[in-house]
Image: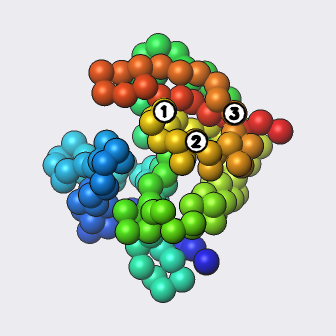
């Protein structure tokens, strides 16, 4: 599948914030409000489209890809590029995660070469963790918030 990315717009942001995942991934459900719109429109989010031009997912980099509680306890030392991603709910579970992830990884490394990549994932999201491990990411730190337990994973050579 061929993907393209573009800067986030308000209409795409609203669509993404209205996506609804089923349990247990409903943890990732959002709502359209001033705070969530402000974050997704901060310039660190990119929309990803498939070859038909349909919205397929998104990714973000920097602080937007970090869990604030993790920053407070110091699980994000300097030196890595943090990134996060999300697929449209209708596209999950169809075996396209590897292609989507590879595309995002390539995009980020073209924009910011030379630093290792790091992501944060909820520990219950076993399919995402398996995907990240397949791409060479290793578990680094674990921390707990009031809502979930998270892992940071760093790309290792």
What residue sits right under mark 3 in the picture?
A: 138
What residue sits right under mark 1 in the picture?
A: 123
Name the element at disc 2: helix
Sort mark 2 into few (<14), some (14-19) or many (20+) by Cα contacts within 10 Å: many
Residue that appears at 57% across and 61% down:
97
Horizontally, is 90 left or right of 5 in the view? Answer: left
Residue that appears at 63% across and 60% down:
98
Query: How many labels sit on residues?
Result: 3
Q: Is residue 34 above or below residue 144?
A: below
Quarter of the picture containing the C terminus is: top right
Q: How far apart are the alpha carbons under marks 1 and 3?
A: 13 Å
Residue that appears at 43% across and 40% down:
64
Q: In which quarter of the image is residue 53?
A: bottom left
Name the element at disc 3: strand
Residue 119 point in image, percent of width and height: 56, 38
What residue sits right under mark 2 in the picture?
A: 129
Mark closer to the chain start, 1 or 3: 1
| 1 or 3: mark nearer the eye | 1
Q: In this view, does 97 lie above or below 148?
A: below
Q: Is residue 119 above or below residue 99?
A: above
Q: How far apart are the alpha carbons under marks 1 and 2?
A: 8 Å
Residue 128 visible in this rendered orientation of the protein: yes
Sort mark 1 into few (<14), some (14-19) or many (20+) by Cα contacts within 10 Å: some
Residue that appears at 47% across and 41% down:
125
Residue 109 point in image, percent of width and height: 69, 52
Q: Are marks 1 and 3 in contact (CB under 8 Å)?
A: no
Name the element at disc 1: loop
For this orientation, the residue located farthest to the bottom is 52
Q: Foreground residue, 54 or 6?
A: 54
Mark closer to the chain start, 2 or 3: 2
Q: How far apart are the alpha carbons under marks 2 and 3?
A: 9 Å
Sort mark 3 into few (<14), some (14-19) or many (20+) by Cα contacts within 10 Å: some
């Amino acid at each position: 599948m061929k993907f393209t990315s573009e800067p986030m717009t308000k209409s795409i942001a609203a669509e993404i914030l209205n996506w609804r995942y089923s349990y247990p991934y409903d943890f990732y459900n959002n709502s359209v409000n001033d705070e969530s719109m402000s974050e997704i429109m901060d310039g660190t989010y990119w929309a990803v489209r498939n070859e038909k031009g349909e919205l397929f997912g998104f990714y973000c980099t920097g602080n937007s890809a970090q869990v604030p509680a993790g920053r407070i306890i110091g699980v994000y030392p300097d030196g890595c590029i943090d990134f996060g991603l999300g697929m449209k709910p209708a596209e999950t579970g169809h075996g396209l995660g590897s292609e989507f992830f590879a595309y995002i990884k390539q995009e980020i490394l073209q924009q910011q070469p030379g630093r290792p990549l790091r992501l944060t994932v909820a520990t219950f999201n076993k399919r995402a963790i398996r995907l990240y491990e397949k791409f060479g990411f290793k578990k680094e730190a674990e921390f707990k918030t009031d809502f979930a337990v998270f892992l940071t994973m760093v790309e290792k050579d």
